[in-house]
Amino acid sequence: MSDLISRGAVLTASRLSNFAILLLSPVLLVRILDVAAYGQYQEFMIYAMLLTNVCTFAVDSSLTYFIPRFPERERSFVTQTSVITLAASALSMSTLLLAKPLVLKLTTFDFIAPLAAYVFFFVNLNWLEYYWIAKRQPRVVLYYSAVRLMLRLSVLLLVAYATRDVLTIVWTLVAVEALRVLLVFVYLARREMFIGGLQWSGVVEQLRFAAPIGISAFMQSAGRNIGKIFISSTLGSVALAYYATGSYLLPIIRVMRSGITDAIYPELVRAHNQPGAAVRLWQRV
C-alpha cells in the first residue's frame, strides 16, 4: 500500500506541476499578444481540444486497463492503440480539410491546415504516459511530461514574443509535436514495442471498452467549449479573448484527484481475480 501511496503522490505532483506550467501560458500570452491575436490563439486551441478528443476517443487511456489485465498482450495493445489512433486521426483530419469551406464559416481566420497538422501529430504516440502509469513508472511520467510541457511553453512564448503572429505560433507548435512523435517513435522502435500483425478481435475489444469513455470525454469537452465557439463565430476573436480569460477555471481538486485515480485504477484491474482484494483496496483509498 505504501508503494501505491508513493505512486499516487508522484502522479499528483506531476499533474500539479504540469497544471502550473500550463497556467503560465495564458498569464504570459495576454501580456505578449494583443487582444485580437490572443483571441485567435484561443480559437485555434478550442478546436484543437475538441478534435483531439475525437481522434483519441479514450483509446490511449484504455492502456491503464488492458496492460494490467492482460500483461502478456502488452505489445499487442500498444500496437493496436497506435494503429487505431493513426487511422482515426488520418480520417478525421482528412474530413476536416475536405470540410474547410464549411468550417471557415464559423472561424474568424483560416487556421485549418495548421489545425489538422497539429492535431494529427499531437494525438499520435501520445499514449506513452498511460503506458508508464500501467507499468507502475510514475517518476518517468513526471519527468517526461514536465520536460515536454516546459519545452512547449518555452517555444510558444519565444515565438509569440518574437513574431506576435498567430499562424507562426501555431505552425511552430506543429513542428514541436512532429519532433516529439519522431523521438518517441525512435524510442519505441529501439525497444521493439510494436508487433507486425493485428487481430481484428483485439481491436474490437479495445474499441468496445474505450467507446463509452471516449463519448463521455467528448461530451464534457464540447460542453466546456461550445460557448466559446459560439462567442467567436458571432462576436469575433476580441470578444472570445475577453470571454476565455474571464471564464478561465482553476480545477485544482480535479487535477489532484486525477493523479490519485490514475495510480489506483491499474491496481484495481490487477486485483480483479483476487477475492475481496479490489473491495479492500477501494475502502483504503
Image: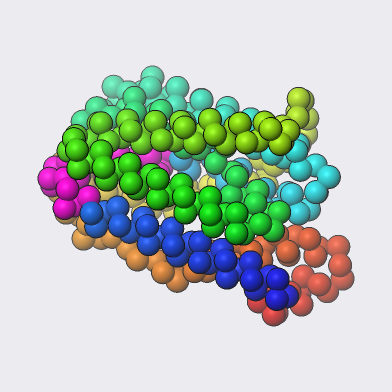
Residue 77 in the image, given as x and y percentages of width and height: 72, 40
Looking at the image, residue 7 sits to the left or right of residue 273; the answer is left
Where residue 113 sits, quadrant-wise, is top left
Please tell me which residue lies in front, 224 or 248: 248
Report the residue at 57% width, 36% height from top. 184
Report the residue at 47% width, 32% height from top. 179
Query: Could you tell me which quadrant the C terminus lies in?
Result: bottom right
181 vs 1: above or below: above
According to the image, what is the colour scheme of the structure? rainbow
In the image, which residues are magenta?
Answer: 29-51
178 vs 224: above or below: above
Residue 180 visible? The answer is yes
Please tell me which residue lies in front, 205 or 65: 65
Please tell me which residue lies in front, 76 or 230: 76
Residue 84 visible? The answer is no
Looking at the image, residue 264 sits to the left or right of residue 22; the answer is right
Residue most toward the top? Answer: 98
Looking at the image, residue 81 sits to the left or right of residue 142; the answer is right
Q: How many marks?
A: 0
Query: Could you tell me which quadrant the N terminus lies in?
Result: bottom right
Please tell me which residue lies in front, 196 or 108: 196
> Dominant secondary structure of the magenta stretch?
helix
Residue 255 in the image, given as x and y percentages of width and height: 46, 65
Residue 10 in the image, given as x and y percentages of width and height: 57, 66
Where residue 2 sits, quadrant-wise, is bottom right
274 vs 219: above or below: below
Residue 249 is inside the magenta segment: no
Report the residue at 41% width, 28% height from top. 117
Report the residue at 58% width, 27% height from top. 87
